[in-house]
Image (spheres, grey):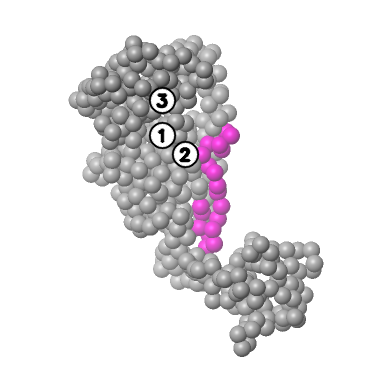
Amino acid sequence: MQARRWAAALVVTMAWLVPVGATGEAPLSAPEKRAVVEELGQAIEAAYVFPDKAKTLAAALQAHLETGDYDAVTDKAALARALTADLIEASNDLHFAVGVDPAWVADQAAKQDPIRAAALRDEERRREARQNFGFAGLRYLGGNIAYVDLTHFADPELGYDAAAAAMRFIENGDAVIYDLRYNNGGHLEMAQLLASQLFRGDKDQELFDYYYTLDGRRVERGQWVLPALPAKRLTGKPVYILTGSTSFSAAEWFAYTLKKLGRATLVGERTAGGAHPVDRKPVGSDFFVQVPIGQIRDPVDGGDFEGQGVTPDHLLASADALAVAHRLALAELAKADPAKRADADWLAPELAARPQPSAAALKAIAGRYEGRRVDLVDGKLLYTWRERFRLTLEPLGGDLLAIEGVRDFRFRILRKGGKVIALEHLDRDGTTQTYARLD
């Protein structure tokens, strides 16, 4: 069980990249720094996925030490930062990280005690629960498209119930969008669970094939589509994955494999390029090193994306990826079923890129209309009716205004001689009602 948890972890926690230093600590002596560098080299040689490169990395750190590059370093956190930078530079592998965490190092030894190990697992469960096991947002977009915002891939042993609830939530969508733009990775088993919903369960389909080092021995594993799931499968439904430059490790593998298998369309920016499974190894009594311990291969041609990243099918700024993926999904659904063309046409103004109107243009819309009014407050149009209900209006271009929280109708500005004369209530079915301007 323990091996399954960490061997599949493909995560760089941002806290690891900014090592914590103790306050008021005594300056590091030269012998102490030498001991850290030597023990770090030993840890890398024992665990790094590429044994020949491991010796080179250990030698590179030793060379930095001998040439005095660490002489000016006086505290543990600064040394960890310098060692991290030198390891990444020598390996071009962003998974490497050195940090200072004496409590964690002590916990590794304490895990030999079953009671302490159980307490640490409970602490991890509570920490994950506060993050909802990575499921930051679930909702349905216009056109019955399910949306999943996933910040990381939690250990499914801890997050299974949350994952099952999310999978059930999206099972009635006509398409699904997974937002992995800011996902730094996590456990490959969670990626396996979520990806399994996109394939048939009665046909063998491999998702990931990888090997890693465990206690000095090589372990090879393959992960396949699971035959039993807690939710309906989304077989045949369009899938879109949003990517960004901060999509890393397991997030990249989820996207890369589904693209290779022809099961998902990727939208956004090229990903970071961290393809290797990692483990965290103690170094002395205060330091640790996050070290890549294996390789993962895709099930199609055995490739990976280490150091290169995953290139989306639609390459564009990550900030624009959701709107573009939404448009693509609507178009794909309409192509398959012409009856859904109305959804695509209705939502097109909301999803189109558009310039913001000037302050003068917004001011021209503000005024009193039959039974309602529009006010300009802090640069926003506020729509009020019956003197108590108020919602924000969003300009959609072409004199169209969306109404906050309202999906089935919008307003259109009517003009005469360049002057706003009325608000037109425009229903989704095409019916209209006009409210004349009163001022």
Looking at this view, is 378 or 273 the one in front? 378
Residue 49, percent across and down? Answer: 27, 27
Question: Looking at the rendering, in which quadrant would you find the C terminus?
Answer: bottom right
- SS at badge 1: strand
Give the CA separation, mark 3 to mark 1.
23 Å
Residue under pointer 2: 152
Residue under pointer 3: 78
- Observer able to see residue 339: no
Looking at this view, is 117 or 356 the one in front? 356
Give the CA separation, mark 2 to mark 1.
8 Å
Question: Looking at the rendering, in which quadrant would you find the N terminus?
Answer: top left
Residue under pointer 1: 11
Residue 308, percent across and down? Answer: 28, 44
Give the CA separation, mark 2 to mark 3.
28 Å
| Mark 3: amino acid | Ala
Q: Residue at 41% of width from left, 33% of height from top?
A: 12
Task: Check disc 2: other Cα within 10 Å, few if <14, some if 14-19, many if 20+.
Answer: many
Asked if residue 347 lies in the magenta stretch, the reply is no
Q: Which residues are magenta?
A: 129-147
Residue 165, percent across and down? Answer: 55, 42
